Every structure is written in structure tokens, then in C-alpha cells.
Image (tube, rainbow, N blue to C red):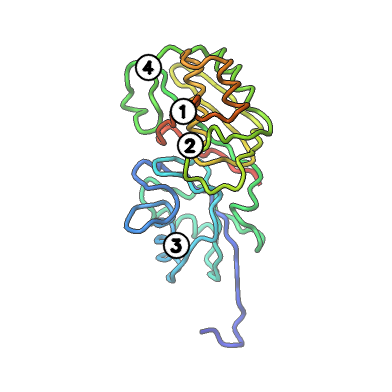
Amino acid sequence: MRSKSQKFFSRNVKLALEYDGARFFGFQRQNDKPTIQAELEKALSKLLNRPSKISAAAGRTDSGVHAEAQVVNFKTDSRLPLERIQKGLNALLPKEIVVKKAEEVRSDFHARFDARRKTYEYRVHHSKIRSPLLDGQVYRYPYPLNLKRMKQAARELVGRRDFKAFQASGSSAQTSVRRVHRLQIIPKGELIRFVIEADGFLYHMVRNIVGTLLEVGRGSLDLKDFNILLRKGDKTLAGPNLPARGLVLVRVCY
């Protein structure tokens, strides 16, 4: 217990994390299952020599989803320099998780509520033959694709609209209306990157959108039915919910 002569020293520290989510059951802590949050809080508690929890995370990535720039913040009264916090955590965290940056932010900063936009990428390996170097990081798709038709459909998704056709069941979101600022399909060799930037995302929204665009590209869903899907929010016309392994949180804007 602090004496009255001691000054309370409070800091709000923001961390940028990169992680391979393959062996984790998502970001959020779960009982008896490995998660990113559980590993981070365990490392924080050991480093700061007291029980420590994060205050917030920019996004609660699902089981198997990766991140290049997940953002979290935590409050502490430790005077440990930021450089030592970063190095100390990286020494304690499992090899799949790294702290890329640590910085002190204003006391009311909140990693989730202050986020204005997030960018996700879904990565598809367009090949009939699997790649041992890419397995676990991409979704392999062996069928022919019409990229021009896919890009035409993707343009219809940019803007503010109701994305309920791409929302998985079990979502607690109060509204399915979101604004997509950017949706790019970027092919390079056998790798196709689907880059989606929005003010927020519904449960499995990106994985369902990419699954549907692949159906358009393959010819299993024509553009007329794609537009009906958007207009009516008809989930029965949507493509499959793709595996988590191809999804990466790449940027959070504040």
C-alpha cells in the first residue's frame, strides 16, 4: 500500500503487435485455451512483477487469424522505460508473438473505441499445387478465376451499405451497416491479396466477402445474382465462409 507521501504514477502504454495466430484460439482470453491476450498478460505480469491486464485491443481476431499490426493498450504505474517494456515482453512472449512498438499515449486513449478504420487482408494462393512455405498463411484456391469480373463485383461493395448478407450468425452487432472505404484485389504471381479497409467489420465479414468474390470469379455466381444478394441481403446467395488462416489484420488507423 502506498503511503500518502508517495505520488501515484500512472501511464497508458500502447503496443503494436504482430502474431501468427495459427495455434491460438483467437485474441480474447478463454478458459484453458491458448490465446494472444492470455500470453500477453502473462508476460506483462511477469515483466512488471504484479498481476497485469490490458485495457483494450483494437480487434478481437478469431481463432487462427494473424496480425501485422494489432493494437492494445494497458495502464501501469511502473516506471520501466518503453524500450525495456518492449524488449522485456519480446523476451517473455512465445515466438509467434512480437511487440513491434511501445509508446506512451494520453490517459484516455482506448485501442478499440478510438480506432477510426481497420484494414484486413485475405490472402489466396491461386494454384492447383500447395506450397509448403505458404501453408498456414494463405487459402489455396485451385480453380480458374475471372479477375475482371471479381473486381467489377468488388466495386459494388465500396461505400456505406448494409452488409448483413456477409455477417455470420452469432454476431452481437446492433447494426450491420458499415462503410467500406477501399476494397482492392491485387494479384502478384500465384498470390491474390484482397485488401479491405472499413470503419468496422461484422463477424466473419471479410471471409464471407472474399468467399463470395471467388464464386463470382469462378462463374458460380453471376453479377446479376450478386447484386440481388446485396440489395436483399440474401445470405443464401453468398459464397462460403473461408478458413481463418488467410486473414490478417494489417493496419489500424486512429
The mark nearer the N terminus, 1 or 2, is 1
The answer to whether the residue labelled 3 contacts the one labelled 4, judged by CB atoms less than 8 Å apart, is no
Relative placement, left or right, of 173 versus 218 is: right
Tell me the amino acid under the disc marked 4: Pro
| Residue annotated with mark 2 | 248
The mark nearer the N terminus, 3 or 4, is 3
x, y (%) of residue 231? 63, 26
The mark nearer the N terminus, 1 or 3, is 3
Number of marks in picture: 4
**Distance of mark 1 from mark 3, alpha carbons?**
32 Å
| Residue annotated with mark 4 | 142
**Distance of mark 2 from mark 4, alpha carbons?**
21 Å
Residue 44 tag number: 3
The answer to whether the residue labelled 1 contacts the one labelled 2, judged by CB atoms less than 8 Å apart, is yes
Q: From the image, state whether disc 4 or disc 1 is nearer to you.
A: 4
Disc 1 secondary structure class: strand
